[in-house]
Image: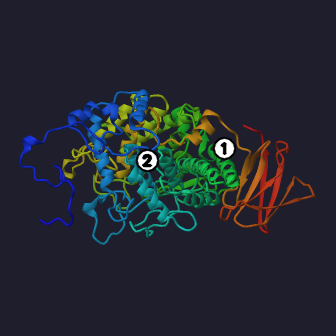
């Protein structure tokens, strides 16, 4: 072997041939080096987030951060979490491409690969912005700040001109599927904030990227073309939560960039959407609510026309991957764990009665007991999973439990002040990993079928490892260690939970029409181009004209109407441009 260059020093474990083993003994851990497994386990609680990685925040010494974590750690982390924690770090690192720096695919595996052919493109060896941000966020939790910064640069380079990211893309940034998932457009903003929070932006300026993405959110949100499961359009609690958090984060960046007017637009929009969450996604006296003896619950997703007097959807949503006759249902009969995002991203208190009631419905409808512990389905009637006989998924099937949902539930329990419950769920995730330490996308919930290698509570033929699941595991370990939810944005928590703030305006836009205006609020009309807005109250014959103004966000023009003094029951008539007509009714403040 010939070396291409000379080295000033060659050490053991790098190139040197280890022939005199007695000369090489173990020494103390130093930055960039690990110790023995035994010593690592002894230090698990003390140094878990930093022991193995040579990465520091420039503004804060590592010992100080470790001491702060020790003060806040609510539980003693058992030795058993260390192996999968380190395995998760390896899985995350392995899934970063070595040529397209910062790009991480969803999985090197092929779900139900034994039934797939070479002609099938795509699959999980693509980059999903949502999975990418969750994975890179876990890298920050693990201490790999440099790797995470590479991901931020990758996001900067793959953003579309209008501010969005493709639903998924090849490593070189070429879009594959082109669905519009609003959470995938919001997540990169939250990721930039996480990098900034850790003091690791260095020479990267994310504001141009954030500005374009925030403009897209304001222009097109809060309705999403597809939810995070890539199946339904409408009002999704998860998608809305991520969007609102991203808008508040973007507002902070806007102020730092010297654009206070843009920051104000973003906050007004976030506040208005936050007040609309229950109107769009919370139902009362539903069949599920009555069955669970609760007042109401958040739904999985509501159709985009849910507030219309005569919705074209009929209040029904499609159910994907189900046979004919089972492929749609009333939206208020479908629940998912997605509502926990309202707590995860800081919009609702974990003890809010509406959240607590929804958790009861989730557990009654979606929780299943397996040999490895409790597990949760994505939503009732899910069809993405093996057939009942264990044969591979083939466009229709039966959804199985997802281990990452146990991690999300654990984060909720930690936020609610139940660290021991969160720790138990961490153990469930560990038990659901393969013997080789891989976390699967789904686990089997039926009787064992040894001939198909399907065992209750263990991996199905779906993707394994699922990088997103390993990211959730790593972040949960960090959250337990810190005593708080690691990736919760503080902007939302301060604004909507710690010091709740009411919206100053309601928003009307052609793609998201509000039909009620809380008394005492102004009505903001939003358009994609400059236009005139005529408005009048009741049968008045003196319509008032207001010109929209440019917010400087691409395609976002607004007009504020003087409606704050109108009484309850007043009927506001709108004529937007030459054709758009609408009626908004003033209702009592809730």
Residue 379 locus on image (x, y percent): 45, 47
Task: Find the distance from the CA under tag 1 to the CA under tag 2.
Answer: 26 Å
For mark 2, what is the residue? 378
Height in image: 276 above or below 188?
A: above
Height in image: 100 above or below 259?
A: below
Which residue is farthest front?
Answer: 8
Q: Quadrant of residue 277?
A: top right
Which secondary structure lies at badge 1?
helix
Q: Residue at x 59, y 61 (%)?
A: 212
Residue 505: numbered disc: none
Which residue is farthest bottom?
Answer: 119
Q: Quadrant of the C terminus?
A: top right
In the shown orientation, is residue 124 left or right of residue 331? left
Which secondary structure lies at badge 2?
loop
In the shown orientation, is residue 106 left or right of residue 292? left
Height in image: 271 above or below 2?
A: above
Q: Residue at x 80, y 69 (%)?
A: 578
Residue 275: numbered disc: 1
Q: Quadrant of residue 384?
A: bottom left
In the shown orientation, is residue 524 left or right of residue 491? right
Is residue 425 visible in the rendered structure shown here?
A: yes
Is residue 439 visible in the rendered structure shown here?
A: no
- Disc nearer the start of the sequence (1/2): 1
């Amino acid at each position: 072997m010939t070396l291409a260059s000379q080295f000033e020093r060659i050490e053991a474990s790098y190139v040197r041939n280890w022939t005199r083993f007695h000369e090489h003994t173990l020494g103390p851990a130093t930055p960039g080096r690990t110790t023995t497994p035994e010593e690592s386990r002894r230090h698990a609680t003390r140094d878990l987030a930093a022991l193995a990685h040579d990465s520091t925040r420039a503004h804060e010494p590592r010992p100080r951060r470790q001491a702060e974590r020790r003060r806040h750690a609510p539980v003693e982390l058992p030795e058993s979490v260390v192996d999968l924690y380190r395995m998760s770090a390896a899985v995350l690192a392995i899934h970063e491409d070595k040529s397209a720096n910062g790009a991480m695919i969803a999985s090197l595996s092929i779900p139900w690969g034994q039934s797939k052919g070479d002609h099938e493109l795509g699959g999980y060896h693509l980059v999903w912005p949502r999975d990418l941000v969750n994975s890179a966020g876990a890298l920050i939790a693990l201490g790999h700040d440099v790797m995470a910064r590479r991901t931020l640069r990758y996001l900067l380079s793959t953003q579309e001109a209008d501010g969005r990211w493709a639903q998924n893309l090849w490593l070189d940034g070429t879009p594959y599927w082109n669905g519009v998932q609003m959470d995938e457009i919001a997540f990169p903003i939250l990721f930039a904030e996480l990098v900034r929070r850790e003091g690791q932006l260095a020479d990267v300026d994310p504001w141009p990227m954030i500005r374009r993405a925030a403009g897209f959110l304001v222009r097109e949100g809060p309705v999403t073309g597809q939810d995070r499961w890539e199946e339904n359009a409408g009002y999704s609690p998860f998608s809305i939560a991520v969007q609102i958090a991203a808008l508040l984060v973007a507002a902070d960046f806007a102020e730092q960039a010297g654009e206070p007017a843009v920051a104000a637009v973003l906050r007004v929009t976030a506040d208005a959407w936050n007040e609309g969450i229950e109107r769009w996604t919370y139902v009362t006296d539903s069949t599920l609510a009555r069955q669970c003896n609760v007042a109401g619950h958040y739904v999985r997703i509501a159709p985009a026309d849910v507030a219309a007097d005569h919705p074209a959807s009929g209040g029904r949503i499609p159910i994907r991957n189900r046979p004919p006759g089972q492929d749609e249902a009333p939206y208020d009969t479908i629940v998912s764990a997605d509502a926990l995002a309202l707590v995860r991203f800081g919009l609702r208190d974990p003890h809010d009665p509406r959240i607590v009631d929804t958790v009861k419905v989730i557990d009654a409808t979606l929780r299943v007991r397996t040999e490895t512990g409790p597990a949760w389905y994505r939503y009732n009637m899910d069809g993405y999973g093996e057939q009942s006989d264990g044969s591979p998924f083939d466009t229709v099937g039966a959804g199985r439990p997802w281990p990452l949902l146990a991690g999300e539930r654990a984060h909720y329990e930690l936020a609610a002040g139940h660290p021991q419950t969160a720790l138990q769920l961490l153990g469930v995730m560990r038990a659901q990993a393969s013997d080789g330490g891989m976390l699967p996308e789904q686990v089997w919930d039926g009787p064992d079928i040894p001939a198909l290698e399907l065992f209750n509570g263990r991996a199905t033929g779906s993707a394994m490892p699922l990088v997103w699941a390993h990211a959730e595991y790593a972040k949960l370990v960090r959250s337990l260690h810190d005593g708080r939810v690691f990736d919760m944005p503080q902007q939302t928590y301060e604004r909507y939970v710690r010091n709740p703030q009411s919206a100053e305006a309601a928003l009307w836009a052609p793609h998201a029409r509000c039909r009620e205006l809380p008394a005492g609020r102004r009505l903001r009309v939003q358009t994609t181009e400059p236009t005139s807005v005529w408005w009048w109250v009741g049968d008045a014959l003196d319509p008032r004209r207001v010109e929209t103004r440019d917010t400087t966000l691409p395609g976002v023009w607004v007009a504020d109407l003087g409606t704050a003094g109108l009484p309850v029951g007043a009927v506001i008539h709108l004529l937007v441009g030459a054709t758009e007509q609408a009626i908004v009714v003033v209702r009592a403040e809730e």
